[in-house]
């Protein structure tokens, strides 16, 4: 009965490769997010989708491309991986897109780029 | 631009003591201030949240104190327990009818809390 799930949990890859991280939520929420947590544990939003529509797109290299096939799924595809992309990536969801809605986070995907 | 500043970076407290974590913000448009708790290897989880129309909110051993004029808010953990050992993040978000800040959480840098038995 996992609320927000991500796969894979760990991802180790070489520089220059392309990889994807998948996220699914079974909470019936309309809004989903991707966050990046760096080695100092700082959390920063990357993207937000509401009903499959891109709402928030922070200053993220265009090598990162989110895709939302339906409102329960938000995947993150990363092209030409760089060393600096190594981090923990969290997916989250909330009932609606507005301030004050609790965001529920997934368990995270630890990406290591060698 | 760091809009939410959190201190201290780390905190060590004895069991039964009071843990206090402070945050300060710059953007007066912020209208929602949650605290998230993160255990190692897990995602952050909402602990408690407050809106600026109240100065204090208490849930069990956890209390948020909010000072709107000073643009500061803090988390107090009473009777701290070893199971409270985790990283705590303050955050803030605001409504922006015309912009793209809907639900966007801006996080503080995090505080690693260790409660010794």
Image (spheres, grey):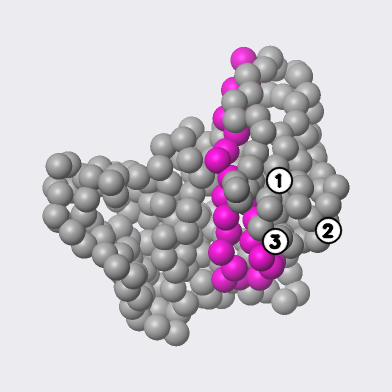
Chain letter for the residue marked with disc 2 in the picture: A
Residue that appears at 22% across and 50% down: B81
Q: Is residue B16 left or right of residue B64?
A: left
Percent x, y of residue A86: 59, 27
Distance of mark 1 from mark 2, alpha carbons? Answer: 16 Å
What residue range appears in magenta?
A92-114
Of the two numbered discs 1 and 2 in the rendering, the one whose residue sits closer to the viewer: 1
Which of A71/B9 is in front? A71
Query: Is residue A54 visible from the viewing direction of this image?
Result: no
Vertical position of residue A97 compared to residue A32: above or below: below
Of the two numbered discs 3 and 2 in the rendering, the one whose residue sits closer to the viewer: 3
Residue that appears at 47% across and 77% down: B51
How packed mark 1 is, by other alpha carbons closer than 10 Å (few <14, some 14-19, many 20 or more), is many
Question: In the picture, residue A97 is in which quadrant?
Answer: bottom right
Distance of mark 3 from mark 1, alpha carbons? Answer: 11 Å
Q: Which quadrant of the rendered structure holds the C terminus of chain A?
A: top right
Mark earlier in primary sequence (3, 1): 1
Query: Is residue A65 visible from the viewing direction of this image?
Result: yes
Mark earlier in primary sequence (3, 2): 3
Percent x, y of residue B111: 35, 48
Which of A19/B59 is in front? B59
Mark earlier in primary sequence (1, 2): 1
Q: Mark 3 sits on what residue?
A: A29
Percent x, y of residue A78: 75, 31
Residue that appears at 66% across and 58% down: A27
Q: Mark 1 sits on what residue?
A: A24
Q: Is residue A51 left or right of residue A14?
A: right
Q: Are marks 3 and 1 in contact (CB under 8 Å)?
A: no
Percent x, y of residue A71: 79, 55
Q: Which mark is residue A53?
A: 2
């Amino acid at each position: 009965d996992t609320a927000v799930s991500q796969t894979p949990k760990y991802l180790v890859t070489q520089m220059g490769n392309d990889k994807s991280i998948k996220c699914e939520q079974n909470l019936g929420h309309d809004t989903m997010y991707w966050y990046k947590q760096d080695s100092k544990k700082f959390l920063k939003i990357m993207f937000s989708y509401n009903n499959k529509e891109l709402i928030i797109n922070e200053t993220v290299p265009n090598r990162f491309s989110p895709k939302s096939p339906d409102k329960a799924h938000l995947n993150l595809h990363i092209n030409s991986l760089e060393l600096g992309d190594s981090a923990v990536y969290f997916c989250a969801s909330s009932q609606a897109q507005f301030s004050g809605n609790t965001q529920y986070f997934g368990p995270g995907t630890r990406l290591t780029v060698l | 631009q760091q809009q939410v500043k959190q201190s201290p970076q780390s905190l060590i407290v004895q069991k039964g003591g009071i843990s206090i974590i402070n945050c300060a913000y710059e953007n007066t448009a912020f209208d929602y201030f949650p605290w998230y708790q993160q255990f190692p290897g897990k995602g952050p989880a909402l602990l408690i949240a407050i809106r600026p129309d109240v100065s204090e909110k208490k849930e069990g051993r956890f209390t948020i104190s909010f000072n709107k004029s000073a643009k500061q808010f803090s988390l107090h953990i009473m009777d701290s327990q070893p199971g409270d050992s985790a990283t705590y993040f303050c955050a803030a978000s605001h409504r922006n009818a015309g912009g793209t800040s809907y639900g966007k959480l801006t996080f503080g840098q995090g505080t690693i809390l260790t409660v010794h038995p």
